[in-house]
Image: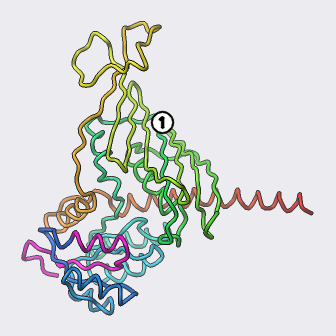
Amino acid sequence: MSLKSKSLKISVIGVGHLGEIHAKLLKQNDYAILEGVYDIDSHRAEKIALEHSCKVFLNLNDLIKSSDAVIISSPTTTHYEIAKKCIENSLHCFIEKPITATYLQATRLIKLASKKKVIIQVGHVERFNPALKAIMKYDPLPLFIESHRLSQFKTRATDVSVISDLMIHDIDIVLWLVKAKIKNIYANGVAVLTNTIDIANARLEFDNGVVANLTASRISAKPTRKMRIFQKDTYFSLDFARHTVEIYRIIESESTDYLGSPALMLGDIENSSKKISIVYETPPVQDGNAIAEEHNSFFRAILHGEKVPISALEASQALRVSEMIEKKIKKSLQLFQSQSNKLIF
């Protein structure tokens, strides 16, 4: 692979809904040249290639020979074999989340990438969400986190559970913010429209006392992507879909070194030993295209040696936790089924 020029030859593997977005954005990226696309549906690949004026590859071997790096946005169950083949041929890989179908597969990819000195970045796109980025200047130190990630039913991504499909976004964010070991996991969920879990709730308890309560559903009437973060003296409310943030902070009333306005609906805290009030803020959110930012960080890592924002190791830990949650749910469902059978007979 030669990186003598600024631009990298990038190919997209899997051009469904998300893969098409990757291809479109690559055409606008100063770091990259969209070399080509590949999809098991050759007609779909030809259509996308025609729209974006790039090559259509009929097999992975030809794609690998023509590329400096790849974006893998094929179904999750195919991630491991495709990434393995690319890494063995020294191609840097951007892999959509979840990194692989299983934690064991992820660990194997990490070892192989280390051996071949290949970069892996994983597409946990919510890390780039403007709402999340806006609260980082406050150095959040969560004590309790609650998230709701609800989606209308779509046939894509039903090869994995709602935990690996949706909840894993919030698992990744929680692990990134808390930075502690998980002590206990409590979870429940059900399969409704598919053969995998469609609705799930998980409570994560960490060694440092932090608790996270996560809910995900892919059969909701109204899409929702919200997270609330509670810490000492501060409460953050994030809407990932709307890219908005609301902040409530407790301050000493005599202090004037703050932005915001009094939260009159909550009033003063009358019985405090100090004169304190609750102040409401809506910090400015700098909008942008999260996927385009993912691309740029990946390309800068390749060209300039910068650290990728979501490493394969971090992604593997989020996947490991999602597997633990799914295991807990399946165990509880088996117990429920066993008890139900006893009642019937």
Task: Kindly indicate the quadrant of the structure image that contains residue 59.
Answer: bottom left
How many numbered marks, from 0 up?
A: 1
Name the outermost residue toward the left: 5
The magenta stretch spans residue 18: yes
Q: Determine the secondary structure under disc 1.
A: strand
Tell me: residue 197, above or below residue 75: above
Kindly identify the residue that appears in the image at 29 percent across and 22 percent down. Answer: 261
**For this view, does 33 lie left or right of residue 319?**
left
Q: How far across and how far down the image is residue 268, in percent? A: 41, 13
The magenta stretch spans residue 341: no
Kindly identify the residue that appears in the image at 53 percent across and 55 percent down. Answer: 221
Q: How far across and how far down the image is residue 195, in percent? A: 63, 70
Kindly identify the residue that appears in the image at 19 percent across and 67 percent down. Answer: 299
Tell me: residue 150, above or below residue 236: below
Tell me: residue 293, above or below residue 195: above
**For this view, does 325 lie left or right of residue 247?**
right
Task: Kindly indicate the quadrant of the structure image that contains residue 119.
Answer: bottom left
Residue position for label 1: 144
- Magenta residues span 1-25
- Quadrant of the snapshot with the N terminus: bottom left
Kindly identify the amino acid type of the residue bearing the numbered disc 1: Phe
Q: How far across and how far down the image is residue 188, in percent? A: 64, 52
**For this view, does 170 lie left or right of residue 291?**
right
**Structural crowding at the residue carrying mark 1, measured as other residues with C-alpha within 10 Å and reported as few (<14), some (14–19) or many (≥20):** some
Name the outermost residue toward the front: 221
Q: How far across and how far down the image is residue 152, in percent? A: 50, 60
Tell me: residue 215, above or below residue 151: above
